[in-house]
């Protein structure tokens, strides 16, 4: 359930591994890929950030090349411009060293370089040292999601949109899912509901040991002349305490250049507008101990992010560390996405992918970035668990 890239890739893998199964993909929106999958940076990550031995590192390093092959075979547009992670001051060197260590441990191709290497790759970027990652590119993940959906339908399976799962009960040999446009019975349910996965897990009789908290990522678009100053992807050295990669410049697959995404608190799980919210979602979050613990630890970062979200000059002054020539007139407010971030009751931001398994149900509790890059590998990982149970 869930027509985002993770649910669709899981259905795709199930279809490949066990063509005899009957698969129904249920999605509450009128089309697939409307939430995280259609509102992200579109970057095919190489896998350098993730803790060696983690699911993220394994599935991203394995999934990236498979995704590129998938796109090539189907004619889905993508790029491979490479990316540069830039340390803008000497005090960021230890964090850059740690990234280099992770890149090496994860088997990610990279080159360590200085100001001259930065100037060769991104002539307008500034920095004291950098990591150059050649195998980074861009794609529209919604295109990939639509390709999965089309292939499922062609293979005789069902993709039901405008089907929101609102209840469930156990029945002989499986689960009956109650939807807004009918009911469906299944021997195995895979819950890939993204921003709502913890709620759906409860509907399915489970008890999540974390909650999904929504963090909005807002983008600025660069005007034509500023866009010409970015060849590929220019990233800062990230804050190791946070799962986000830091506000970066990205050349999207169709050529637009964006700055973002920041990470501000969203007062609703689908509150995409800067001033929008949802009372029920907000109250639920405020009541959650993990939210209050998180706020205690990270309130300074949160205030800074909020300030830069509201104040264009502050956003520009921060981005100028990477691209010194940037002017406020170069930026226009653009679009946003919302990250489904699993947070433990002690306020810990859960970093790795989390796939929870019980009889007849698999819940994908945490699938933040780079789950889109990793989709073919994560889909296969989940599908194998489902098949093991069915067999
Ligand atoms: C701002 C931002 C930038 C990102 N950048 C990148 C990037 O550059 N590279 C990368 O690899 N990853 C990136 N990511 C992460 C990536 O987008 C996600 O990891 C991925 O899209 C997760 O896919 P999903 O299928 O789990 O979730 P979603 O795409 O959110 O899909 C979940 C689906 O479930 C449906 N659903 C929910 N509840 C129900 C219900 N009750 N009944 C039926 N359907 C339901 C929803 O409508 C939705 O379509 C980014 C994410 C964000 C937000």
Image: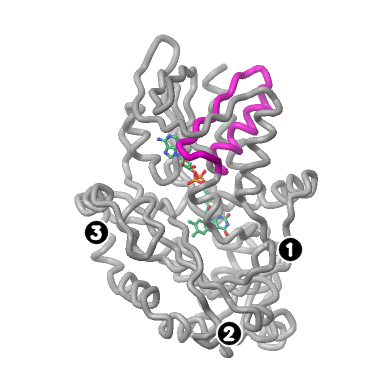
Mark 3 vs 1, N-terminal side: 1
Q: Is residue 155 left or right of residue 336?
A: right
Residue with the mark numbered 1: 80
Residue 294 forms part of the magenta stretch: no
Within-10-Å neighbours for mark 2: few <14, some 14–19, many 20+: many
Magenta-drawn segment: 5-32
Q: How far apart in space, not on screen, are marks 2 and 3 (Cα)?
A: 35 Å
Tell me the quarter of the picture where residue 16 sits: top right
Residue with the mark numbered 2: 323
- The dot on residue 293 is 3
Report the residue at 47% width, 26% height from top: 189
Q: Is residue 255 left or right of residue 276?
A: right
Local SS, label 3: helix
Q: Nearer the viewer, mark 3 or mark 1?
A: 1
Q: Is residue 269 left or right of residue 9?
A: left
Report the residue at 59% width, 67% height from top: 101
Where is the C terminus found, in terms of image quarters? Answer: top right
| Residue 364 percent across, percent down from the top left | 46, 39
Residue 22 forms part of the magenta stretch: yes
């Amino acid at each position: 359930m869930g027509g985002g890239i993770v649910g669709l890739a899981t259905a795709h893998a199930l279809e490949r591994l066990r063509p005899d199964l009957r698969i129904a993909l249920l999605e509450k929106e009128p089309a697939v890929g409307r939430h995280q999958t259609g509102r992200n940076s579109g970057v095919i990550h190489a896998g350098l950030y993730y803790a060696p031995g983690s699911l993220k590192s394994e599935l991203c390093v394995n999934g990236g090349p498979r995704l590129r092959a998938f796109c090539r075979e189907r004619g889905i547009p993508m790029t491979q411009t490479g990316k540069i992670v830039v340390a803008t001051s000497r005090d960021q060197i230890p964090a850059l060293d740690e990234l280099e260590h992770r890149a090496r441990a994860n088997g990610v191709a990279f080159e360590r370089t200085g100001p001259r290497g930065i100037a060769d790759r991104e002539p307008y970027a500034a920095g004291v040292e950098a990591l150059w990652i050649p195998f980074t590119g861009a794609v529209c993940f919604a295109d990939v999601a639509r390709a999965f959906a089309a292939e499922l339908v062609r293979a005789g399976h069902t993709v039901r949109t405008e089907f929101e799962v609102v209840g469930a009960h156990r029945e002989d040999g499986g689960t009956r899912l109650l939807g807004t446009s009918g009911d469906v019975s299944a021997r195995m349910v895979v819950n890939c509901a993204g921003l709502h996965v913890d709620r759906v897990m409860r509907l399915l009789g489970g008890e999540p040991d974390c909650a999904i908290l929504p963090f909005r990522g807002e983008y600025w678009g660069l005007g034509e002349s500023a866009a010409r100053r970015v060849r590929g992807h220019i990233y800062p050295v990230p804050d190791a305490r946070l799962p986000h990669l830091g506000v970066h410049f990205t050349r999207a697959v169709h050529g637009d250049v964006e700055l973002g995404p920041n990470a501000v608190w969203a007062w609703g799980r689908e509150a995409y507008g800067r001033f929008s919210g949802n009372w029920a979602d907000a109250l639920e979050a405020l009541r959650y101990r993990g939210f209050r613990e998180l706020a205690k630890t990270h309130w300074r970062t949160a205030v800074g992010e909020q300030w830069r979200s509201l104040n264009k000059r502050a956003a520009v002054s921060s981005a100028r560390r990477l691209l010194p020539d940037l002017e406020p007139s170069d930026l226009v407010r653009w679009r946003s996405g919302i990250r489904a971030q699993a947070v433990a009751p002690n306020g810990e931001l859960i970093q790795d992918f989390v796939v929870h398994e019980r009889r007849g149900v698999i819940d994908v509790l945490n699938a933040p970035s780079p789950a889109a890059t990793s989709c073919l590998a994560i889909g296969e990982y989940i599908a194998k668990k489902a098949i093991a149970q069915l067999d």
